[in-house]
Amino acid sequence: MARLSWTQRLYWRYFSKPVGQRGLFLHAIETPIGSILEIGIGSGERTKQVLSLCVPPEGVSQIRYAGVDAFESAKPGTPHLNLKAAHRMLAAFGVKAHLIPGEPVSALSRVAHTVLPSDLVIIDGEWGTDSLQSRSIAEWLPRLCHIQSTIFASATLGGKLEQIPVPATAVETIHLRRAA
């Protein structure tokens, strides 16, 4: 995406909806992002907004995206994309997508060693709670991010996303370059 005009930046800073995700939108505008990991895609609206704002860093032609979600097995009544619709949406943005179906507890343990650490990690729901899902994500998080990553998380589905600190045991950037 091209650089935003000052009126567009003004909109994303003060008027964008939902209000609880403005910090994420501002980060996407101000920081070059080459890779995204999203745990809990939901309806896909946040994903569309973030991808429309992202500018990849120098030398990166295609943003790498990994998404963990229940997709078809989501609880009835919650807005969710099915797997095919998610692939279609991500293809429209031209990102290299790796979608992982399943609950985060099992999905992360299956793919944590195959998904490279991401520049931006979004955790939608149950972060910071004393649940099995929260503990499982916290256990795998050092493997899923690097020391220069930015992590946004919320305690409830669709809740306010807060920036949280990167784990001290996160992968060093120099190791990431060798692995990639």
Image (cartoon, rainbow, N blue to C red):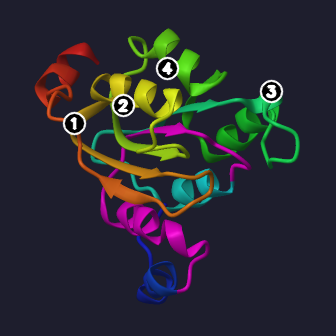
The mark nearer the N terminus, 2 or 4, is: 4
Coordinates of residue 110 in the picture (x, y in percent):
51, 10
Query: What mark, if any, has residue 167 been given in the picture?
Result: 1
Report the residue marked by disc 2: 138
Whether residue 88 is situated above or below residue 124 in the rendered picture: above
State left or right for residue 147 relative to residue 103.
left
Query: Please, what is the three-letter code of the amino acid marked with disc 4?
Result: Leu
Q: Residue at x 68, y 56 (%)?
A: 45
Element carrying mark 3: helix
Which residue sits furthest right? 76
Element carrying mark 1: loop
Q: Label 2 crowding class (10 Å Cα cut-off): few <14, some 14-19, many 20+?
A: some
Q: Residues under labels 1 and 3: Cα distance? A: 30 Å
Read off the magenta span.
15-44
Report the residue marked by disc 4: 108
Observer-side mark, 2 or 4, equals 2
State left or right for residue 133 relative to residue 114.
right
Coordinates of residue 13 in the picture (x, y in percent):
44, 81
Query: Please, what is the three-letter code of the amino acid marked with disc 3?
Result: Ser
Q: Are marks 2 and 3 in contact (CB under 8 Å)?
A: no
Q: Residues under labels 2 and 1: Cα distance? A: 9 Å
Residue 108 visible in this rendered orientation of the protein: yes
Query: What mark, if any, has residue 103 been given in the picture?
Result: none
The mark nearer the N terminus, 1 or 3, is: 3
Q: Are marks 2 and 1 in contact (CB under 8 Å)?
A: yes
- Front-lying residue, 1 or 157: 157
